Image (cartoon, rainbow, N blue to C red):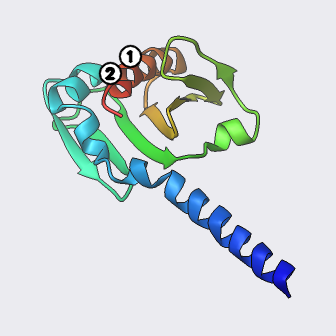
Amino acid sequence: MELRRRMTLAGCVVFASVMLSGRAAWAVDPCSLLTTGQAAAALGVPDVNAGAGANRCIWTPKKYKQGAGQLTILLEGANDGAKMMGQGTAVSGIGDEAIQTVVGNGAVLHVRKGNTWFVVNVHGVPPAQATQVEQTVAKEIVGKI
């Protein structure tokens, strides 16, 4: 019976540590990681709208501009899907760890700073352009996490 109590306690400690490990990420407002000016510059437009979600922010041009795309920042917490599945290519010089994935005509940059993973995605532009913008934006964000 004593072993069962210890195992239950150990399980609770592990569960709590996993749940709290990503908690710092959720305390950050994803839309605060870039100014509207930084997001607009990244998309090559004069002004943007920011749409917030529970753990993400999406910036879109206020006025349609062909080829501008949209920029999304997603806070993942302590784990990253691409890392866990062994996908992507390592990128040096961004955060503590960065992985660039390109699937079809889309590119996504996964970045770890400390215990927090975040994703930068530019959608609606060619992958080479998206990759460059994502890396520039990620470098700006790393200092704020």
> Which residue matches tag 1?
136
Measure the C-alpha gap from mark 2 to mark 1.
Answer: 7 Å
Q: Quick check: 122 above or below 72?
A: above
Badge 1 element: helix
Q: Residue at x 55, y 61 (%)?
A: 19
- The image's mark for residue 140 is 2
Horizontally, is 129 left or right of 88 in the view? left
Q: Nearer the viewer, mark 2 or mark 1?
A: 2
Res. 107 image quadrant: top right
Q: Residue flagged by tag 1: what amino acid is it?
A: Thr
The numbered mark at residue 109 is: none
Percent from the top left, x then y, of residue 46? 13, 24
- Residue 144 percent location from the top left of the image: 30, 30
Residue 138 in the figure: left or right of residue 14: left
Report the amino acid beneath label 2.
Answer: Glu
Given residues 105 and 144, the one toward you in this image is: 144
Whether residue 60 appears in this view of the structure is: no
Secondary structure at numbered mark 2: helix
Residue 57 drawn at (x, y percent): 32, 46
Q: Residue at x 65, y 30 (%)?
A: 104
Asked whether residue 105 is in view, the answer is yes
The crowd level at tag 1 (other Cα within 10 Å; few <14, some 14-19, many 20+) is: some
Quadrant location of the C terminus in the rendered image: top left
Camera-nearest residue between 105 and 6: 6
- Which residue occupies 44% across, 25% down? 125
Taking the spot 45% from the left edge, 16% from the top edge, the residue there is 129
- Residue at the limit of the structure toward the top, as seen here: 93
In the figure, residue 36 lies in which quadrant?
top left
Image marks 2 and 1: residues in contact by CB distance under 8 Å: yes
